[in-house]
Image (cartoon, coloured by chain):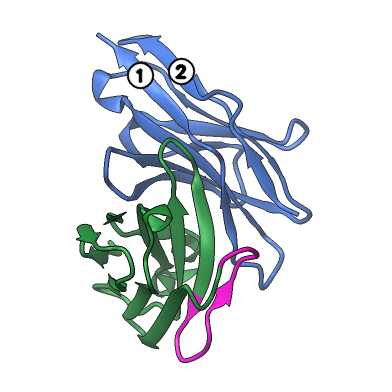
Chain colours: A green, B blue
Amino acid sequence: GAVVSQHPSWVICKSGTSVKIECRSLDFQATTMFWYRQFPKQSLMLMATSNEGSKATYEQGVEKDKFLINHASLTLSTLTVTSAHPEDSSFYICSARDLTGGSSGANVLTFGAGSRLTVL
Amino acid sequence: AQSVAQPEDQVNVAEGNPLTVKCTYSVSGNPYLFWYVQYPNRGLQFLLKYITGDNLVKGSYGFEAEFNKSQTSFHLKKPSALVSDSALYFCAVRDGLKGTYKYIFGTGTRLKVLA
């Protein structure tokens, strides 16, 4: 089945530095990927929709200059947290839809394992 | 606007007993409904979905869910709970209107199965 790989799983950085998180679809092409942020004991908050070859669509309240998204190929989207601060510490999860299985499978999101960011 | 509600933060059930995790939704078009499970420090794993067809949907690990249009609900059920079912469960909805690919997740329900 469809597999989404997310890297790194854990990252600790100093305040003011930038961190890049990668999301790869391993066995399918994903024209669209989604980035979520999950706070402790809370739901997933959709941050942005990453579109291959074009600009990402950000949700209301999400700073696009803070959370840079690049979807340069059909299998890779990256999220860069720029000038990270402790309040950016969170669990970031990406997901994608595998369209190769037809409409039935296309509606199912496949998630990466998540990346836990800790900003000191 | 689409929304999902999971009214229970936590559900406790004894092993071997049936379990129900509740979910209600609101969309303007036809609902595409999903259940996902999350284990600690992991991404979400797909359990089952309702797109169209039979209201009772069977999914992975013995879970099933019933779509009830009049009550706008999509409760997750399992006839006999296992300790290994203990995890965080998310209900999600996507508006079936063409061109809308946004998935909205509920706040999650922590299921604890007691041995």
Label pair 1/2, CB-CB below 8 angstroms = yes
Residue type of the residue flagged with mark 1: Lys
| Residue A106 seen by the camera | yes
**Residue at coordinates 48% horizontally, 39% vertically from top-left?**
A42
| Residue B18 seen by the camera | no
Badge 1 density bin: few <14, some 14–19, many ≥20, Cα 10 Å: many
Q: Which residue is mark 2?
A: B11
Determine the CA span between mark 1 and mark 2: 6 Å
Region rendered in magenta: A50-62
Quadrant (top left/top right/bottom left/bottom right) for the N terminus of chain B: bottom right
Is the magenta region chiefly helix, strand or loop? Answer: loop
| Residue A20 painted magenta | no
**Residue at coordinates 52% horizontally, 63% vertically from top-left?**
A47
* Viewer-side residue, B67 vs A23: A23
Q: Are marks 1 and 2 on the same chain?
A: yes
Protein chain holding label 2:
B
Secondary structure state at the residue bearing disc 2? strand
**Is A61 situated above or below B104?**
below
In the displayed structure image, the side of residue B85 where residue A62 appears, left or right: right
The numbered mark, 1 or 2, whose residue comes first in the sequence reads 2
In the displayed structure image, the side of residue B16 where residue B77 appears, left or right: right
**Is A31 situated above or below A19?**
below
Q: Which residue is mark 1?
A: B112
